[in-house]
Image: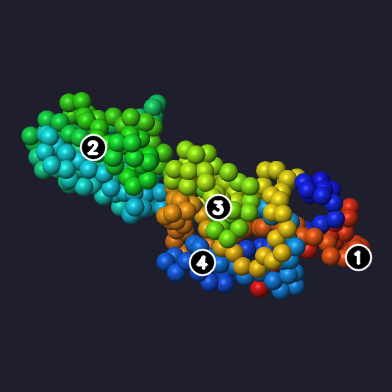
Amino acid sequence: MSDTYGIANDYLYSEYFLDSYDNSGKANVDYNATDWPRFELGGKIPLKGVVAIKVVSLEVPFSYYVFKSSNNTFRLSENGGANTTITIPVGNYTSGEMTTVLGTLLTAATGVGATYVVTISNQTNKLTFTGSGGTLASFILTFGSVGGTGNTSPRLYLGFEGGPTSSTGLTLVSTNSVNLSGANYLYLNSLAIGSLLDCNLPFGSVNLGGGNGSIQIARVPVNASPGGTILYNDPVPDFWFDVGSLENLQSFDLYLSLGNQGSTATIVPLVLNGLNFSVKLGVLRKKTTDDKTQGGGYDQGRVVKRSRPF
């Protein structure tokens, strides 16, 4: 870190260790406190005269589900007939598990006595659906609507475009590669302090407010597989988000969202299924005294203090 903290000299640096298990209650009554916690700060370091904030590090368990109740259905039509809804059980899948599940679900749903087998190519990473038997002559799989964002169907993870895709004879190949591990990144968000930080999205981010009124405070690469732990460390430690002069920072919320899903209009926090995420928050405050602490906490004019929320 530079002597200026990316802003100016003569500031005090504090760290807050925020674990969602250590919440002061729910930020929203419709969600678990561990998924959308509210934190009350204070105690031995009242956060007055805050001039800059940043997320220093973050730990998130990959305990959330890629396939959940909001995006796990698509439709099957055989021989030009009516649609039947296919529901993938909620959870996370390997490629072998997913191909087995899809074949079983489609075979169970057939209305013409067909059998379906689903495979995945090692070369193209695309799914191939093959039907046989009964009176099956053709079939169509429909994933949401044409031009839709894909957040209400599994098409983004199974490699399909929005709307119907027709088989060629008795074979249908997904348009795109599959991505069974889900989104490549998460956002850490805060309704209370997100607008204070100069984090920005483009107008094309229609699921996140279209680039207006951003509430994101960190973008976190998903660097773990289901069952592991996603780890984030600030990639530019010499720079900070200037918040002007925030006279009192006492209470705020934090929550995670998946990839480009969710918005300020329809907030859907990432559900960690009872597990906790943790954040190390760095805060710069105006100095209110010229006193300096010699020894372990003093280094190049900086006073370093660490605390936990009370």
Q: Depth check: 298 or 241 in front? A: 241
Q: What residue does disc 3 label? A: 215
User: From this viewpoint, is residue 100 visible?
Assistant: no
**CA neighbours of label 1 inside 10 A, class few (<14), some (14 to 19), many (20+):** few
Q: Which three-letter amino acid code belongs to the residue tagged 4? A: Ala
SS type, badge 3: loop
- Label 3 and label 1: CA atoms lie apart by 36 Å
Q: Which mark is residue 27?
A: 4
Dot 3 or dot 1, earlier in sequence: 3
List x then y, in percent, for residue 111: 11, 43
Q: Are marks 3 and 1 in contact (CB under 8 Å)?
A: no
Quadrant the C terminus occupies: bottom right
Q: Which three-letter amino acid code belongs to the residue tagged 1? A: Asp
Pair 3/2: label in front: 3
Pair 3/1: label in front: 3
User: How many callouts does the rendering have?
Assistant: 4
Pair 1/2: label in front: 1
Q: Residue at x 57, y 46 (%)?
A: 219
Q: What residue does disc 2 label? A: 141
Q: What residue does disc 1 label? A: 291
Q: Is residue 96 left or right of residue 244?
A: left
- Label 2 and label 4: CA atoms lie apart by 40 Å
Q: Is residue 199 left or right of residue 150?
A: right
**CA neighbours of label 2 inside 10 A, class few (<14), some (14 to 19), many (20+):** many
User: From this viewpoint, is residue 234 visible?
Assistant: yes
Q: Is residue 177 left or right of residue 300?
A: left
Q: Which three-letter amino acid code belongs to the residue tagged 3? A: Ile
SS type, badge 4: loop
SS type, badge 1: loop
- Label 1 and label 4: CA atoms lie apart by 38 Å
